[in-house]
Image (cartoon, grey):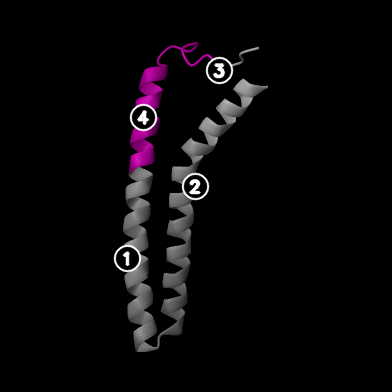
Amino acid sequence: MNVFPDFDGLGGIGDLRAVIGALLTFVLIVAVLMLIVSAIVWAIAAANGNHVMAGKGRTGVLVALGAAVLAGGGVAWMNWLIALGDQL
């Protein structure tokens, strides 16, 4: 039995895919920029002995890394689930 979602069942699904792709690109770009800025703040604050700002920079790095992983891994996870559903 071949079970696969009908991606053409809704009108305008191509436009929705284009919007989602653009948003994913925007999220990944912002996450990388946030990662760079937070790493710079963390490094400068740690070098100057400002532990409060170093902690905030470290938190920013972890949040940016988590956002990039979730945004990038979401597509791969969804494709894996679709492939898994096809095997049932």
Mark 4: which secondary structure? helix
Mark 4–mark 1 distance (CA, rounded to whole Å): 27 Å
Residue 66 x/y as whole percent = 49, 55
Q: N-terminal of the two: label 1 or label 2? A: 1
Q: Residue at x 37, y 38 (%)?
A: 23
Q: Is residue 65 magenta?
A: no
Q: How many marks?
A: 4
Q: Amino acid at mark 4?
A: Val
Report which residue position mark 3 lands on: 5
- Residue 51 in the image: above or below residue 81: below
Mark 4–mark 3 distance (CA, rounded to whole Å): 20 Å
Q: Amino acid at mark 2?
A: Leu
On residue 37, the disc is 1
- Residue 9 in the image: above or below residue 25: above
Is 41 displayed left or right of 51 in the figure? left
Report which residue position mark 2 lands on: 70
Q: Which residues are magenta?
A: 4-25
Mark 2–mark 4 distance (CA, rounded to whole Å): 18 Å
Q: N-terminal of the two: label 4 or label 1? A: 4
Residue 58 x/y as whole percent = 45, 71
Report which residue position mark 4 lands on: 19
Mark 1: which secondary structure? helix
Crowding at mark 3 (Cα within 10 Å: few <14, some 14-19, many 20+):
few
Crowding at mark 4 (Cα within 10 Å: few <14, some 14-19, many 20+):
few
Q: N-terminal of the two: label 1 or label 3? A: 3
Which one is in front, 84 or 78? Answer: 84
